Structure formats: C-alpha cells, structure tokens
Image (cartoon, rainbow, N blue to C red):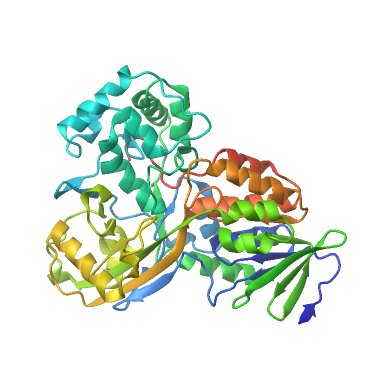
Amino acid sequence: MREEETPAGTGHVVVIGAGIAGLAAAHRLLERGARVTVLEASGRIGGKLLPGEIAGVRVDLGAESMLARRPEAVGLAREAGLAGHLQPPATATASLWTRGALRPMPKGHVMGVPGTAAALSGVLSEEGLARIERDAALPRTEIGDDVAVGAYVAERLGREVVDRLVEPLLGGVYAGDAYRISMRSAVPQLFEAARAHASLTEAVRALQGRTATAPPSGPVFMGIRGGIGTLPLAVARSVRARGGAVVTDAPVTEVRRTAPTGWRVVAGERVLRADAVVLAVPAPAAARLLRAEAPAAAAGLAAVEYASMALVTLAYRRTDAQALPEGSGFLVPPVDGRTIKASTFASRKWGWIAEEDPDLVVLRTSVGRYGETEILGRDDEDLVAVSRHDLKEATGLDAEPVAARVTRWTDGLPQYPVGHHARVARVREHVAALPGLAVCGAAYDGVGIPACIASAYAAVDQIHGDLRAVQQLTAHPVQSLHGGAGE
C-alpha cells in the first residue's frame, strides 16, 4: 500500500461514492474551501443516473426527471453549467391502465389520496366511490409516530383507492409495496395533515386549500437536454475544474479513525489521510465501512432493504407507432395483474428526444417491485417480449422495434417501511458522535434527486459542526413526488 501525502492545513475530505449525492457533497465542499477526493468503487460515476443511447438517440437508462419544486437539483444543474439545457416535459398528461382500459390520470388528489370521491370517478367502481364517502363519518384514526400509507388509506377510504391509484404512484417511486411504505417518510405533508384532521378527505382538502391560496409557479418536474444522466457528468467536471479529484475503480475497504481527530481511508493499494469522510454509498456498503467505528449505525444501515427493477427501452419507426395514444405514458396498478408497472413515451415527454430523430419513437417500460424475483430472473429477450405484449394490450402498438435495451438496477431502490424515520435518526445520532463523519444518499431522506442532494448538503454542514440541516431533514423528509393538489 502507498500512503498519499496530504499537505497540512488543507482540510482534506474524502467522499466515498460518486453518485449524485457524493458529487453534490464534493461540489459543496470545494465551495467551502476544502481539498476533496472522491472515491468510486465502480468504473463510472453517476450511480442511478445513467446516460445512454438507442438507435443513435440519447436517452436516460436510469432516472429521467427531477422534482423542480425543490431547489437543490435544478440549482446544482445550473451551478454545473447546465442552465441552458434544463427543459420541462413537453407533456405531463399521463394515464392509468386499469380495469382493461387506459384512463386519464385523476386530478385533485395528494399521491393518489382524493379530497372527494368525485376526483376518482372513472377509475374506481361505484362501490369504491361510495366507500370514500364514508370517510367523513368514521371515527378518527390515531396514526401515532408513523403508519403505512396503504394500511391507513385503506382503513379510511377502502382498499380500492390504494390498489388502483396510491399503489401505482408510490410503486413508480420506490418499486415498493404501499401497504409497507411509511407515510411519514414517503408522503410527509399528507402525514402531518392526517394527524391534524379527523378525516382523511378533510386533510387532503386542507392541503389543496393551502396550495390554492399560494399556488407554486413553474413546472413540477424538469429534465435536461441529453438526459438527466448528464447531470453527474457535469458536476464531476466542475469538481475537477475546481481542483477536486474523482477516482473511479477505487473500492474502499476500510474507514478508521486516527488520533486525535483524523481518518484513514483504504482503497486498494491507496491509503488516504483525511480530516473528514462523507459516506455517500448505499446502506449495505455504508454498513460494512462503519462496522468497526460505528457498529450501532452499521447495524441500522444493514437492516435497510432494497428493491430491484429493470427498465426496457424500445425504439420504433414513427410510421410503425401510429397506434400510440397521446400523453406522456401510463402507470399500471399491480392489482390488474400485468407484468409492466409503467410505460413512458419518452419521445412525447421530452422534446429533445423527438428533435434528435423525428422519425423515431422512443418509449420505455419498467418491471420489478419489492419482493418480486421471478420476473427479474428472466433474460433480456423475455423482458422485451413481455413489455411488448403489455404495450400491445394497453395501446395496440404491435410493431417490431428497431432497437431494444434492458437496464437492470439490482438492489437499486431503498425501501422506506414504517419506522424508517426513526431508524435514520438513530443512525445519524451514532454517526454524529464521531467528529468528521457524515452520511448521505437515497437511503435516508428521500429517493429523488433533490432529496439526495439535500442530504449531501446537510452532510457537508455536519462535518463543519452544524447539525441543523441534518435534524431538519430527518424530521421532515423530502417528498419524492410533488403529490400536490391538481397533480
């Protein structure tokens, strides 16, 4: 092993992980005057943000959009030189494929939870709509410190609301099970409203009323010309331009404290001395690295479960895709028994994809949810075949694609079960006891891009001795979908 020299007084910080959280942390640290080294175990940067191409057209093979009503992601993109590349969706008109037909996505709900039964007319059965009306007459449901979204909504409004709308909306974010997902962590504004009102529909209407009196401006979501996957590349360029080092193929095997306040980081033959360390890796990797110095934090992180999923990207000749309906795509409730859980009509949703090849139509499907193993065990050809089958059933599209790509995200999405916020608080409490150490990423305060960046900025504050941002995020996670009135 060779030990790398660190000049005295430079404030050297090692960031472990070059996903968007690690790169955002490095970017912020450099602004604060630190010397920064980013170590990435794999051969590429970007984590779940992955640019690619199909049939000569640039596409995203991972996350494709970012919440624009939080400032972190759009702000970082601008700081990294992408201000001129930011682009809202060309259309946000989505559908639900349920009960044998594509139906317009309802409006007037918060993450699928309606303020009135009429909001879900056309999606729910008459019995399901009547069940919603009973909410106002039910006794108050105490939800305590946390509750599963699906269980609580089903108790108040009936299972049909959960199965037909809440489940596909949440499943699109977490690839999880609504009956396990924490309402406090996944839909924090609804959780707080539900605790303050006797009925759930009353709570939703209160949220909608606040939105109506101060409507947010601008688009809900934002994309980037060339793909969201270009964001980490731009941030890494900015980090390097400011003097930071970003090293790939450098798996870290050991993180240990050194007297009196420093840290020793081992990555292969490289040994680095640091004044502080930011762990921006998935929970299992963080657990392994913290086992020696913070065993209680490591135990909490080791208990975080993950879901796997796959994206199937398909390209068609435009003349062969005339059957495709209008809109940006559709979600699929699991209760309908289909294989795919969603499809995005990428050429419709993002103007820049259509401009790159007007004669091509690009779309993608997603498969895989928490606990599903059989479907993800199939080979790529089978995943393409089942995606084409479901697309034909939903839209009538029966042409042969000119190209197809399957991107697998094994253990790609952390799960937020009931009590997730308490687990995160305990992990951070143990980490905070070690000066110069902080954690960030999708396993903590939200799986969306703004949430990951917010946790990175809070981690930077923490290693500078300021715990206020960490405490605020732990108490109030970042919602990964807007979920506001009218959406």
Q: Is residue 420 left or right of residue 404?
A: right
| Closer-to-camera residue (147/11) | 147
Q: Which residue is drawn at the image coordinates 74% and 58% (left, top)? A: 293
* Res. 244 visible in picture: no
Q: Quadrant of residue 222?
A: bottom left
- Where residue 387 sits: x, y (%)? 23, 65
Q: Which residue is drawn at the image coordinates 28% and 32% (left, top)? A: 158
Q: Which residue is drawn at the image coordinates 72% and 57% (left, top)? A: 32
Q: Is residue 399 left or right of residue 411?
A: left
| Closer-to-camera residue (243/421) | 421
- Where residue 376 sits: x, y (%)? 34, 66
Residue 265 in the image: above or below residue 472: below
* Res. 376 visible in picture: yes
- Where residue 265 sits: x, y (%)? 73, 69
What quarter of the picture does the N terminus occupy? Answer: bottom right
Residue 209 in the image: above or below residue 89: above
| Closer-to-camera residue (280/304) | 304
- Where residue 468 sits: x, y (%)? 68, 41
Q: Is residue 463 left or right of residue 226?
A: right
Q: Quadrant of residue 130?
A: top left
Residue 53 in the image: above or below residue 72: below
